[in-house]
Amino acid sequence: MRLTLHQLNILKVVADTGSISGAAQQLHLTAPTISIQLGQLAETLGTPLHEVIGRRLRLTAAGQDTLEAARRIDDELRLLEQRLAARQGVERGRLSIAAVSTAEYLLPNLLGRFQQAHPGIQATLSIVPRERLLARLADGLDDAYLMTRPPGDKELISEALGRNPLVMIAHPDHPWVQRPDLTLEAVSGEHFLVREPGSGTRQWTAEWLAHFGAELRPALELGSNEAIKQAVMGGHGLAVISLKAVLLELESGLLRLVKLPHFPVPVRWHLVRRRQRLLTPATASFRQHLLDWLPQLDQLLAETLARHGQPWSSDEEHLLETASDRIEVD
C-alpha cells in the first residue's frame, strides 16, 4: 500500500472535526487539498472511506477501520519517540488527559505539578461534561480519562485512585444548618439547586430522594458548579456538590454542610484507559503522579470533613458504595 502518514493524519482530523472544511481550517490546508488526499487514500485502499449525509461527513465501516489503524500507528510512533528519547537520557513525549467537569478543581493543579517534575512532556487537558467525555473515550482521542463512573466496558481499564465525596451545602443562615435533629423526610420537601439535565449529581440527588418517596423539585437549574455555589451563597436553597469544589467556601464560612444520613457520599475517582491503547512512558508517569499525590489530597478532604463535623464513616461507605459507583460527579 502506498498510503502516507500525512493521509492518515488528514483522515483523523476529518473524523474529529466531522467535515472537510473543519479539517482544512485546522490543518491550514484548502478544502480541495483535503478532498484530493482522502480520495487518493480511498483509491489506495480500494474502498470508499466516507460519505456525506446532509452537511455532515460520516466515515464508512472501512473508514472506521482505517481510522482505528491510523490511531494505533500514531500511538506506536509516540511510543517510539519516547523510547528513543529515554535511550538518550531525555524525558520527552506528549500526554493528553480528559476529565469530567468537577476535575477542574483537581487536575489543573496536579497537572501543573506533573509538568514541573517532567518538563519534557507536553501535556494537554480537556475538561468536558460527561457525555462529551464518553464520546472522546469511545473515539480514543486521549491517553487517559478521569471520571467517577467509568462505563462497564471490557475494552477499558479502570483504576480507582482517590476520593471525590459528595456533600450537601447550604447558606450559613439556612434553618437546616442549625438543626441537629434534621430528618430525611424534612429535607425531601426542600427545593434544590441542580445542574442541567443529564448531570450525574442531579441524577444521584433525584435517586436519593426517590429512595425516601420524595421527588426532586429543582428551584434553579444552573450550568456549572460555580453557578451552583453562588446561588447557594445567595440563599436560594440547598445543593449536592463535590466537596473539592467548596473547600475554600467552607473554610471561609461562606457555606456550611448540612448534616444528614448518607452524607458525605463516598465517591471515588477512576483513571480510565482504552485497553488497546499503548501505555506510553508519559502516561505511566502521570498515573504514578496521581498515585503519589491523591492520598495527600484525600487526607485534606478527610480533615476538612472532620472540622465540619462530618467524618467519613466506614459503615456509611459500605452502605452506599454500590450506589456511589453509579454517580458521575460533574
Image (tube, helix red, strand yellow):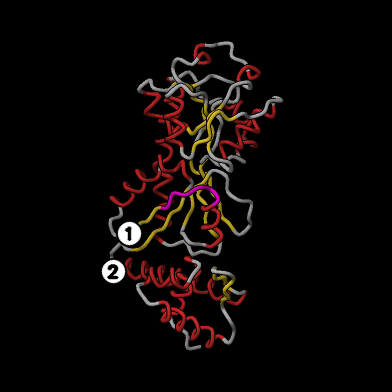
Pointer 1: residues within 10 angstroms few (<14), some, or many (20+)?
A: many
Q: Residue at x 56, y 30 (%)?
A: 265
**Element class at badge 1:** strand
Q: Is residue 230 magenta?
A: no
Q: Residue at x 54, y 59 (%)?
A: 274
Distance CA(mark 1)–CA(mark 2): 15 Å
Residue that sits furthest to the right in the current view: 213
Residue 121's tag is 1
The span picked out in magenta is 126-131
| Foreground pick, 211 / 37 | 37
Which residue type carries mark 2?
A: Gln
Q: Is residue 173 above or below residue 286?
A: above
Res 292 → quadrant: top left
Q: Is residue 178 above or below residue 298?
A: above
The image position of residue 311, as x and y in percent, is 50, 23
Which residue type carries mark 1?
A: Ile
Residue 88's tag is 2
